[in-house]
Amino acid sequence: MSHETVYAIASGKGGVGKTTTTVNLGTALAQAGERVAIVDVDLGMANLSGFVSLTPDSTTLHDVLSGDASIDDATYRITENIVAVPSGTSLDEYADTSPEGLREVVDDLRSQFDYVFLDVGAGVSHETVLPLGLADSVLLVSTPEPAAVHDSKKTLELTERAGGEVTGLIVTRTRPDSDIAYEEIADQLGTPLLGTIPDDPAARESVYAGTPLVVYEPDGPAAVGYRQLAADLAGIDIPTPTSTPETKDDDVPPEDGDDTESEPVSDSDSDSPVSDEEADEREAAHDDVSNAITEAESDP
């Protein structure tokens, strides 16, 4: 296993696949048996809240950072081996948060999980820069577009100022017939190229299906890229799933007005395996996953 366990997934520009990368890296490692936590540290524009079905009074990272709840209260089981800590969507709650509390949150999750992925917001605000210095490693995500690469350079500089370390670059939406040399993009940024994720129509299809790409179409080029990247980061082998799950009645999104809420993981849950029955009870609604990632990753 890699000695680095807390990764900040960052980009200087929205719409480059940062949240999709976070979701699929975490899912691939969870499929390999690693315990994974995904944390939405984009406090102002929450991206991962769709991983759990939340009611307006549900506990989120906002409540934790305002001192009104513990991190366990805001930790929700997604499926086997993976949990999510969503940020809230209320501007009033956002105003009450203290980003400095993220250090304690990260330290707590580090002690409970094998890997922690911080989905960092774009921009240069304090709550955006802070996670870059808290993580063991920062992974830059960018498309080959010049504007995205330029903004990645800013993120790299912010990471250095925050005392963090960029491990390398992930280039998304690559094309085999392109004349762009992706290694040269990494060289321009002065950081290693960790991997490329091919442009894949199945990526958007998986969003609307409410299923991570590595599950939706495990043999597709983008899924293979994410699985290889996860294997390289962790230093483990991650085999391709043997089959793609068939559509079931349970996979149909709930009707409008279905306010079924995912349950938080209790203190005891964090230290012991969760049964299949409990996992089913805490399974996030697929339509919420689709909506959240679609909004976060739509082209600018």
Image: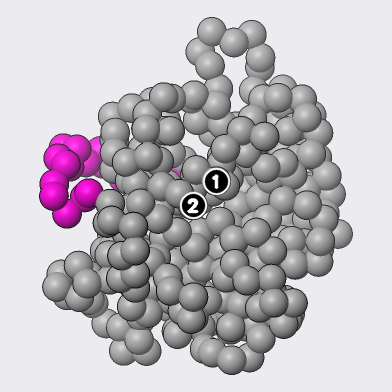
Q: Secondary structure at mark 2?
A: helix
Q: Nearer the viewer, residue 75 or 1?
A: 75
Determine whether 289 is above or below 267 in the image: above
33 sits to left or right of 57: left
Q: Can you tell which mark lies on residue 272?
A: none
Residue 91: x %, y % from top left: 69, 71
Q: Amino acid at mark 1?
A: Glu
Q: What crowding class fits label 2: few (fewer than 14 Cα within 10 Å), some (14-19), or many (20 or more)?
A: some
Can you give x and y, in whole percent of width and height, for residue 15 in the image? Answer: 62, 39
Residue in the foreground of this view, choosing between 84 and 195: 84
> Residue at horizontal 37%, vertical 89%?
267
Which mark is on residue 292? 2
- Which residue has dot 1 on it? 295
Q: Is residue 49 above or below residue 146?
A: below
Q: Is residue 39 visible?
A: no
> Which class describes the residues within 10 Å of circle 1: few (<14), some (14-19), or many (20+)?
few
Query: What is the distance, in whole Å, between disc 2 and disc 1 at their CAs?
Result: 5 Å
| Residue sitting at x 41%, y 47% | 290
- Check contact, mark 2 vs mark 1: CB within 8 A: yes
Q: Is residue 268 visible?
A: yes
- Local secondary structure at mark 1: helix
Q: Who's the residue at 34% across and 57% down the image?
A: 256
Q: Is residue 234 magenta?
A: yes
